[in-house]
Image (cartoon, rainbow, N blue to C red):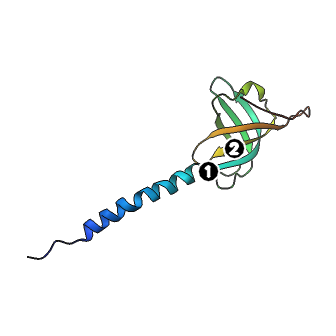
């Protein structure tokens, strides 16, 4: 009789050894923040949704109009259709963070704070 093959045991050991590294790299990629500019099309405070028209967001999505949920605690009553905003998104979700009004048609500039 021959000895059993060591290949399955070696493969299992390698998978167990490198799995934490793969998971850590995936977590770092998933948490990447991307800042972008857009214009508010509509605000639905009841659903906590802001519809934003934006250009291409490199590494995230092509230009278009997208419904985003807002970070919990964001006072959406301060946003108005037509506001130009700066916000941050994460590459793995459709939530706006750190929303700032950078231009309002009457010329007012302000940061939305919690």
Q: Nearer the viewer, residue 16 or 102?
A: 16
Rendered image quadrant of residue 68: top right
Which residue appears at 46% of the width and 59% of the height?
A: 21
Which quarter shows the N terminus?
bottom left
Q: Is residue 50 above or below residue 24?
A: above
> Residue 25 versus residue 66: which sits nearer the camera?
25
Query: In the image, which disc is placed on residue 45?
Result: none
**Where, by quadrant of the figure, is residue 107 drawn?**
top right
- Residue under the image location 67 percent in, 38 percent down: 96
Residue for badge 1: 32
Q: Residue furthest left?
A: 1
User: Quadrant of residue 51 in the image?
Assistant: top right
Question: Which residue extends farthest bottom?
Answer: 2
Q: How many marks?
A: 2
Locate residue 114, reporting x and y percent. Answer: 71, 28
Label located before the other in sequence (2 or 1): 1
Q: Residue at position x 38%, y 61% from top? A: 17
Q: Which residue is mark 2?
A: 88
Residue contact at pointers 2 and 1, CB within 8 angstroms: no
Say what secondary structure mark 1 lies in: loop
Picture layout, residue 18 above or below residue 93 = below
Residue 12 as seen in the image, left or right of residue 62: left
Q: Residues within 10 Å of mark 1 (few under 14, many from 20)?
A: few
Extreme residue toward the right, this view: 107
Please provide percent x and percent y for residue 49: 65, 31
Query: Where's residue 35, x and y in %?
Result: 71, 47
Residue 34, given in percent of the width and then of the height, sits at 68, 49
Q: Between marks 2 and 1, how big is the CA–CA gap?
A: 10 Å
Residue drawn at (69%, 29%) of the image: 74
């Amino acid at each position: 009789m021959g000895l059993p093959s060591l290949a399955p045991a070696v493969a299992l050991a390698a998978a167990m050894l490198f799995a934490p590294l793969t998971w850590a790299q995936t977590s770092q990629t998933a948490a990447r923040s991307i800042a972008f500019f857009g214009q508010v099309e509509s605000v639905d405070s009841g659903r906590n949704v802001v519809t934003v028209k934006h250009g291409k967001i490199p590494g995230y999505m092509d230009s278009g109009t997208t419904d985003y949920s807002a970070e919990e605690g964001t006072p959406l009553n301060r946003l108005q259709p037509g506001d130009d905003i700066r916000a941050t998104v994460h590459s793995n979700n459709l939530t706006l963070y750190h929303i700032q009004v950078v231009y309002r048609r009457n010329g007012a500039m302000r940061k939305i704070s919690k």
